[in-house]
Amino acid sequence: MKTFLKRLPWLLFASLVLAACSGAPARPDLARLYEAEAANPAQPPVIIIHGLMGSTLVERETGKEYWPGGLGTLAFSNYRELARVRAVEAAGGGLVPGDLFYGVARVDYYGALIDALERVGRFRRAEPGQPVNGGEDRRRYYVLLYDWRKENIHAVRQLHAMVEQIRKDYGDPDLPVDLLAHSNGGLIANYYLRYGPTDVLDQPTFTPWDEGAHRIRRMVLLGTPNLGSVISLERLQKGVKVAFRTVPVEVLVTMATPFETLPHPELRVIYGTDGKLVDFDIYDADAWRARRWGVFSPEVEQRVLAAAPDHETGALQMAELQSYFVRHLDRGKHLQLALNQPIHSHGVEVAVFGGDCTLTPGRAVLDHDEKGERLVVRPEEVKARVPGVDYERLLMLPGDGLVTRESQLGRGLVEGVGAGYDTFPFAQSFFLCEQHDQLSVNPYFQNNLLHFLLAR
């Protein structure tokens, strides 16, 4: 009895350990689950469309990598080389996409996803222009590598050319493809389904394309900001933090994509410090100029002038940056409007996957202090607080840390519409407890993805 009592604490400890182990979630055996489906010779090819900053950028002539670069670049660079300056582009220089940005250090972005497609789905990576050689060569995936600094319409046209070439490679003019699109890549896929390679953003009405359903079989939107993200408002005022450094505003405004992921123009997301809605147009460039926000701020002007060889050159550079801002803001507005027109998918199956366990900035407060007004998307940054206002509940919504659940679902434009969705007929949706940049790595996402793609 005494021996048993002496051993009792250890037995209890062992029981707790075993209970903890038995309670740990098991990972799905993907290879076993999809063994039969992976042998289907009629499986359509898959095109992966990465998100913002999801591909490397290399120098056209030398192949030198400027994004993300090595650990030293991540630690010390301000990434001014990423700026899309007209003189460099006109001269044929600048940067071009290299390959997927698989990960950095021990953080994986796309590696596990590629492994699942290759090892479990038995797909192999191919390049457009490589003819299919026999039945076993038909299980292919492709990667749309695009310059994520440019307007998404450029990537849309690349996608169209890729689909057309793949059809030639397969010897099938009616071959449909499956699209797997992450984050901003989902906006590209959405646009292609609706409008094809035509730029409709300057049209008075957005003329739909009738060919989308003839080229796409299934489409996966992973963490896509279908109604934009208020974090883009923050970035255009402060820049975007990368590792230990910040890509400054004067670099970001030369890129179109930060503007194309702003909140939808019809979403009412701006509130006063009293917690009440404010009639404020985030797409009004004069509102930014009058408040000296972002590229119109004295801080940005000081940095640009200090980096220029002389004051006259610096002033010309500032004027160029501000013209970028005005154009990109207008085009971004029209992109959001175009992507959220009512649509019939005509048989294309669309699945939405994302994260909804992290409180994510979903609204903004028009705050003020002694320096003037500013848009704030994080509760702890509100200065002119009004007693009784719960700023965390006001500003933060369920999401993946970057995109809210409502934006991923495209909900909120039509008052009173909920699970029926406002503008897009989704075949299914699935949400995880995962951060935005880790969605593709999650094994439960991969399980549901493979089921969606491989189901006959």
Image (cartoon, rainbow, N blue to C red):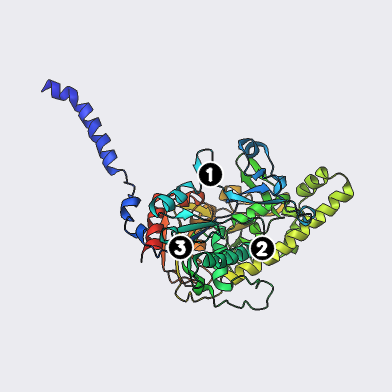
Seen in the image, is 51 located left or right of residue 200? left
| Residue ID at (57%, 63%) | 162
Residue at the front extreme of this rendering = 133
Query: Of callouts 2 and 3, which one flags the residue occurring earlier in the amino acid sequence?
Result: 2
Lower position in the chain sequence, tag 2 or tag 1: 1
The residue that mark 3 highlights is 352
Q: Earlier in the sequence, mark 1 or mark 3?
A: 1
Residue 8: horizontal and vertical position, in percent?
A: 18, 27
Q: Nearer the viewer, mark 2 or mark 1?
A: 1
From the top left corner, tell me how far across and down residue 403 is, in percent: 53, 56
Secondary structure of the residue carrying tag 1 is strand
Whole-angstrom CA distance, mark 2 to mark 1, is 33 Å
**Residue 121 appears in which quarter of the rendering?**
bottom left
- Regarding residue 172, the answer to whether it shows in the image is yes
Task: Please state which amino acid type lies under the numbered disc 1.
Answer: Gly
Where's the N terminus, which quadrant? top left
Q: How crowded is mark 1: few (under 14 residues within 10 Å), some or many (20 or more)?
A: some
Residue 143 position, x and y percent, is: 54, 56
The one nearer the camera, 191 or 47, is 47
Q: Which x, y percent locates residue 327?
A: 73, 64
Q: What residue type is labelled 3?
A: Val
Numbered mark located on residue 259 in the image: none
> Which residue is label 2 attached to?
282
Q: What residue type is labelled 2?
A: Ile
| Residue denoted by label 1 | 103
Q: Which of marks 2 and 3 is in front?
A: 3
On screen, residue 213 above or below 352:
below
Occupied quadrant, residue 253: bottom right
- Circle 2 sits in a helix, a strand or a loop, which is it? loop
Residue sitting farthest toward the left: 1
